[in-house]
Amino acid sequence: MAFDSRADGKEPFGGRAVQIVAGNSNRTLTDAISAELPHPLTRSSVKRFADMEVFVEIHDNVRGQDVFIVQSTSAPANDNLMELLILTDALKRASAKRITAVMPYFGYARQDRKPGPRTPITAKLVANMIERAGVDRVMTLDLHAGQIQGFFDIPTDNLFAAPTFARDIELHMDITRLVVVSPDTGGVVRARALAKRINCPIAICDKRRERAGESQVMNVIGDVAGMRCVLIDDIVDSGGTLVNAANALLAAGALEVYAYITHGVLSGGAVNKITSSKLKQLVITDSIAPTEPVKAAANIRVLSIASLLAEAIGRTARDESLSSMFK
């Protein structure tokens, strides 16, 4: 259902002038968000010079207006990040009143701490760059680590895909024999939040990671025998963790294994790994634009978050609560 900002009899966004600007990272998602809002997309151009430098031009007047840039910093992460920074600079110099960076996927989020000596905290560096460029507010979805919000000295809203997942699970599955599973101990809070919404138990896969991008499930904590399992996580990259978790759950007596993951990074041979695995279905959101192999995969389904982001944009423009969306 489209977000209706006139539902309470007020003018759209309380009479404020609002503009939605699209970067190149995920134009399909931005078009879907715009279709649910009372304002069309702001006309803009994001181009490349011959040497691949980014050039931006805003074609509509944004002076004194509330502007939302929709741009995930997914692959190619550096190009998409530079687009976001340059779009912000262009809008700032065009006298936009407030600039909100709507980042459905916040790239570099996994570099949120020092894993060893002489290593960077790149998520903090990216936050500094976004802030210095002139962004007044950040809106993102299912941050890899919630404390990344503290890397910013500007308001930062971390939205959650759990309500969208819960509705989809209730629509497509019998929840009477369902258990929500965290693929590692670090995701227990996320699993518990989803399980509470659909009123079912949780289980945990005890995972040992030998090196980055590789993992091995050691055992399953919780009763999954005779149950349908739903793995829940924020990011699927190589797909190794999901495949190993699915194998462990099936070995423990699970009937079927599904996975609901917010951000489908799916790098390298991840799609082939998922399609040849014992996962019944992987459901991802369109926070990252799905590639052609993802669209063609028989056991991968893409769930749109356009309505969620459109409602959050509308509430932000009218200075209304976002937390009430997730109660």
Image (tube, helix red, strand yellow):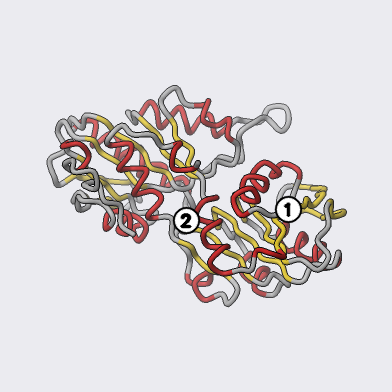
Residue visible at 45% across and 27% down in the picture: 128
Q: Quarter-wise, where is residue 98 in the image?
A: top left
Residues at marks 1 and 2, CA–CA distance in whole angstroms: 30 Å
Which of discs 1 and 2 lies nearer the camera? The answer is 1
- Which residue: 30% across, 57% down? 2
- Which dot marks residue 24? none
Near mark 2 (Cα within 10 A), the count class, few <14, some 14-19 or many ≥20, is many
| Label 2 sits on residue | 288
In this view, the residue in front, 140 or 227, is 227
Q: Secondary structure at mark 2?
A: loop
- State the image coordinates of residue 38 (x, y, percent, origin top left): 21, 51
For image coordinates 60% across by 59% down, the residue present is 260
Q: Quadrant of the N terminus?
A: bottom left
Q: Which residue is mark 1?
A: 201
The extreme top residue here reads 153
Mark 1: secondary structure: loop
Left or right position of 68 against 199? left
Residue drawn at 30 percent across, 43 percent down: 314
Residue 228, horizontal then vertical, whole percent: 72, 66
Tell me the kind of residue under disc 2. Answer: Ile
